[in-house]
Image (cartoon, rainbow, N blue to C red):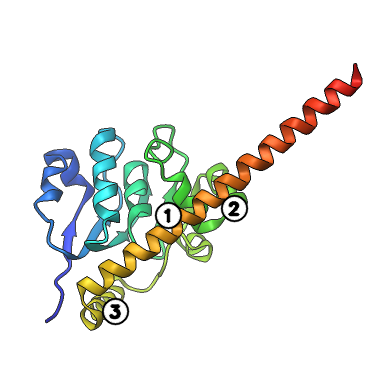
Amino acid sequence: MTASPMLLTPATLLTEGFASWEKAATPGIVVVAMGGHDGAALATDTLRRAVDWLRSPARLSVAVIDGRCADAELALALACDCAVATPTSYVDFSTPTSTIPLGGEIEVLVARVGASRALGVLAQGQVAAVDAHGMGLIDTLEPVEIAMARITELVDRHGTQWWAEIKGLVQTASAATMDRERGRRLVDEAAARIASEAAEYEEF
């Protein structure tokens, strides 16, 4: 039985709210078409619920980027399991109204490209699809039809239940890694503060 990808656009979140996505709750493949929609106007709660919905192990989510991807669209794209883009597309972190920090997607960015590169990406602002692909922000630059056929074949081969269990395991492992990294960072920061305070004390 062939899986039928479900096509969604961020525009429906603006016009109909999250209820329009909740109706499409069937497990399987979800394709979110990005590129030029006004995502900045999305309510924080709506964006958060959409991000959680895309991350759920109940479905495999694919972001299809054609053009500029910014603001809420970028938060949604980072929440997807896979990102496909046309070569002329780009992701844009530079807009003042960016919902990326608000949506908590900084951690996703850091997990994909590393802390130092993430800082460079945020400072640079606009990143071409080719460069984003090299960093790991975009998974493939192949034509959307080819990418979707390959993903659909993989889902059909293993079944949605298998993918749900694997996605859940990967998310658990990723969360554990982030927790360890946060713990090490807090220890390092505390050690630096203690050393600084000790140096200041010795001066007196």
Q: Is residue 10 visible?
A: yes
Q: Nearer the viewer, residue 153 or 195?
A: 195
User: How many labels sit on residues?
Assistant: 3
Cα gap from disc 1 to disc 3, whole angstroms: 23 Å
- Circle 2 SS class: helix
Q: Residue at x 24, y 46 (%)?
A: 50
Cα gap from disc 3 to disc 2, whole angstroms: 30 Å
Sequence-first tag of 2 and 1: 1
The x and y percentages for residue 152 are 23, 76
- Circle 1 SS class: strand
Graded by Cα atoms within 10 Å as few (under 14), some (14 to 19) or many (20 or more), the crowding at tag 2 reads: some
Q: Residue at x 68, y 42 (%)?
A: 188
Q: In what quadrant of the picture does the C terminus appear? A: top right
The x and y percentages for residue 1 are 11, 82
Numbered label attached to residue 146: none
Instruction: Determine which residue is flagged by label 3.
Output: 150
Q: Are marks 1 and 3 in contact (CB under 8 Å)?
A: no
The x and y percentages for residue 3 are 15, 74
Figure check: 98 above or below 136: above
Kind of residue sitting beneath label 2:
Arg
Q: Nearer the viewer, mark 1 or mark 3?
A: 3
Sequence-first tag of 1 and 3: 1
Instruction: Determine which residue is flagged by label 1.
Output: 90
Q: Nearer the viewer, residue 3 or 128?
A: 3
- Circle 3 SS class: helix
Graded by Cα atoms within 10 Å as few (under 14), some (14 to 19) or many (20 or more), the crowding at tag 3 reads: few
Instruction: Determine which residue is flagged by label 2.
Output: 117
